[in-house]
Amino acid sequence: MNKFRKQFCAVLCSIIIAFVSLIYAEEEKLLNPLPDTTKGDTISTLTLEQSQISIAKKSIKKAFFLSLLVPGTGELYVGEKFWAKRFFLSEGVIWGTALVFNIQGKIKRDDYHLYVRQKAGVHSTREDDKYYENIYKYESSEECNEDYRRKAREEYPDNLEAQKDYLSDKLYGPEDAWQWTNPADWDFYRGLRVSSREAFQRVSYCVWVALLNRLISSVNAARLAKGHNKKTLQKSESLLPLKIELKVSRGKPGLIITGKF
């Protein structure tokens, strides 16, 4: 409504300027009179028309894909700052939470890497997760190796070469050996590893929540853009063309305005 008022004031100012210009023109004619005309004839007529006020429509697709890229940007594009702020905030909270969980997971992982060196006699520099998973599952590296040998015999009962190939990259040598001597230490290590894995799992949950947040925001932005366009259409339809006629008869200016306000 404020925009309409500003535009209407601009049109009204134009009318006043035109009306004043016409008066000055008529005064000039009075100073330099033209041949007389028939009484009642219109000496000059000026018509101005105001077309429907067009307020820029918002692209529903653009609003949808903006929020799909960054939640809240589609709402900001439509002009809905209330929704934009909330989706910006939710996005920040989601990724902030993911960052915290990721840091927790790395700290716990570093803790259990150090713990097995202190309590299980590990001197290996290996970092692969499978190695630490086996330390979690087996009391010693020899127990782990024996289980691999059993699986090789079950998988290839009559083929020694196939058993060797199966075991070639699975058995642990002295440099990768471990031995839990205290069950309580083994249980504590398991707790550290579980805590680390749970923290990293929560990071993946945050990613899914972030994707859901994008979907919700994009649908909401499209909805708001559609509503904005509907209001724009209703507003423009309520503003009928405004027709202004400036007439001067026998040196007397007149103003005729027709339309709906």
Image: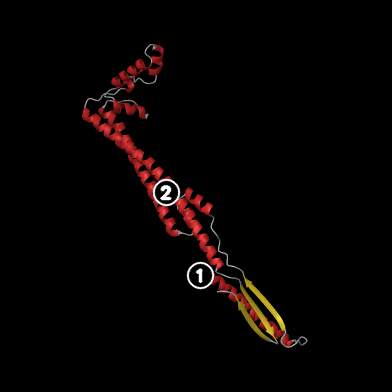
Q: Which residue does the image show at 32% across and 38% down from the upper left? A: 198
Task: Say few, some or many: other residues with alpha carbon within 10 Å of mark 1 (under 14 / 14 to 19 / 20 or more).
Answer: few
Residue 213 is labelled as 2
Question: Does 142 sit above or below residue 40?
Answer: above
Question: Residue 38's x, y, as percent?
Answer: 75, 87
The C terminus: image quadrant = bottom right
Q: Position of residue 126 (x, y in %)?
A: 36, 27
Q: Could one spot residue 221 in this view of the protein?
A: yes
Dividing the picture into quadrants, the one containing residue 35 is bottom right
Within 10 Å of disc 2 (Cα), the crowding (few <14, some 14-19, many 20+) is many
Does 10 sit above or below residue 178? below
Q: Quadrant of residue 255?
A: bottom right
Q: Looking at the rendered structure, which numbered label has been put on residue 2?
A: 1
Measuring 45% from the left and 48% from the top, which residue is drawn there?
Answer: 215
| Separation of marks 2 and 1 at Cα, in angstroms | 34 Å
According to the image, what is the colour scheme of the structure? secondary structure
Q: Nearer the viewer, residue 243 or 205?
A: 243
**Nearest the camera: 176 or 206?**
206
Identified by mark 1, the residue type is Asn
Residue type, mark 2 in image = Asn
Say if residue 125 shows up in the picture: no
Relative to 164, is 256 above or below? Answer: below
> Pointer 2 and pointer 1: residues touching (CB < 8 Å)?
no
Question: Residue at position x 22%, y 28% from top?
Answer: 183
Q: Position of residue 234 (x, y in %)?
A: 53, 65
Depth check, front residue: 208 or 234: 234
Secondary structure of residue under mark 1: helix
